[in-house]
Image (cartoon, rainbow, N blue to C red):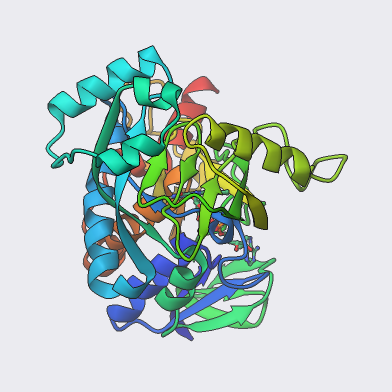
Amino acid sequence: MYDLAIIGAGINGCSVAYEMSNAKKSVILFDMEGVASGGSGAAGAFISPKFSKSGELKELIHDAFLYSMDFYDTHFSHLLTKTPLLHIAKDEEDGKILKHYKEHTSIQLKTPSDTLLDKLTPLAKKQESISMDAGVVDAQAMCRAMCAGTKFVKEKIQSLVYDDGMWIINDAYAAKEVVLATGAYEQLIKEPYMQLRGVWGHRIDVRTTTDNPSSIHQFVSISPSKDGVLAIGATHNVHYHPQTAAQAYDIDEGRAELLEKAGRTLDLQNIEVLRDYTGLRSGSFDYMPLLGPLVLSKETLACGNIRFKVKNPDYDAYTYYPNLYMINGNGGYGFVLAPYLAKILREYIVSGQKINERLSPARFFARWAKKL
Ligand SMILES: Cc1cc2nc3c(=O)[nH]c(=O)nc-3n(C[C@H](O)[C@H](O)[C@H](O)COP(=O)(O)OP(=O)(O)OC[C@H]3O[C@@H](n4cnc5c(N)ncnc54)[C@H](O)[C@@H]3O)c2cc1C
């Protein structure tokens, strides 16, 4: 029997595997396709903060950005490219937000070099911009490195049954605790309050004679060039879903969109598209990630002494699946958030430290139950 089983080997599952293996737990990690085969394998994996005026998501990503840059640099520096980031506003409105961000952030800002600014299109040069130290990680290699010390099994998990104090997985494996890190794929535990949406994304690697020394974000993100190759990503397509679409995804259309958007920022010369990466990002309906135990809705509703139509619900009064947790809903910031969230989850599982209620999946149960 394992101390912990993790289902899903994207950056979330692999980050939890890393934390829990280091906490001396015996861990087994499952993925139906392989490590980094979902959204994580497609990611450009830019590590950057969220440039908005205010809000809890901005604050969370700020903390996660500082934590994760340090985490990757300390433990996996060979897979992290530390690079200056130039973030350019899309339009005047966006420029006002960026100006506000610059005036209030505690992050040390940089002045972009003239060589970099000279490469920008006249339209991009006109907009407000911000520059700071940030990074890009090698997405697939990072996932593989983080779970290198963990037993990995390539298998689709179809059944999870709690019996006699342990979870029985596919009738073949047993674990005391289970973490669901299944991204935007069909959820193993079906609860009516739990809804996640998958946003399809496409990114490309291109060879170009234009040298780019920095990460540049505007309509899309452009990575620094390495040996004449740079990454451009990613599209946000809310209409296409690989499991429900009637037609195959149009790769050429995606490439054209990426190149057109990149071209509004940087004049890229002699482009040859080398590789395409596509995948789903999983997002929650309030954009905050989901971290922690899952509410058993039927059992909780049957509990006669809980009032659901209240402003401040008492999450401690709910009934939860025993020893079962989820980590999901990172949206477009999976590589920024995962190491930070995995640390919080490890502190919860190992030491019982409370998880901030704004991350708790119970918030969706509370909203759902209030409407019943
Ligand atoms: C094109 C693109 C570009 C992106 N760029 C960035 C970026 O620059 N920076 C950034 O921080 N984030 C970026 N993201 C977002 C980031 O990739 C996601 O937030 C992250 O991958 C989510 O990781 P995850 O582990 O939750 O999900 P996933 O990586 O999707 O992993 C879930 C895994 O679970 C497995 N699985 C599901 N169900 C089962 C089952 N029943 N049994 C076994 N296995 C199962 C799947 O096979 C999959 O491998 C990007 C995403 C995309 C698509």
Tell me what residue is drawn at x 45 percent, y 65 percent: 138
Tell me what residue is drawn at x 55 percent, y 40 percent: 194
| Residue 279 pos. (x, y %) | 63, 51
Q: Pick the residue in front: 48 or 320.
A: 48
Looking at this view, name the residue that lies furthest to the top.
93
| Above or below: residue 73 compared with residue 87 | below
Q: Can you see residue 319?
A: no
| Above or below: residue 124 compared with residue 38 | above
Left or right: 63, with 39 as reference point: left
Q: Pick the residue in front: 164 or 260.
A: 260
| Residue 249 pos. (x, y %) | 79, 44
Q: Quadrant of residue 351?
A: bottom left
Q: Quadrant of residue 88?
A: top left
| Above or below: residue 34 compared with residue 123 | below
Q: Pick the residue in front: 54 or 275.
A: 275
Q: Pick the residue in front: 347 or 330.
A: 330
| Residue 336 pos. (x, y %) | 36, 52
The picture quadrant for ligand 1 comes to bottom right
Left or right: 44, with 215 as reference point: right
| Residue 145 pos. (x, y %) | 43, 77
On-image quarter of the C terminus: top right
> How many numbered circles does the render carry?
0
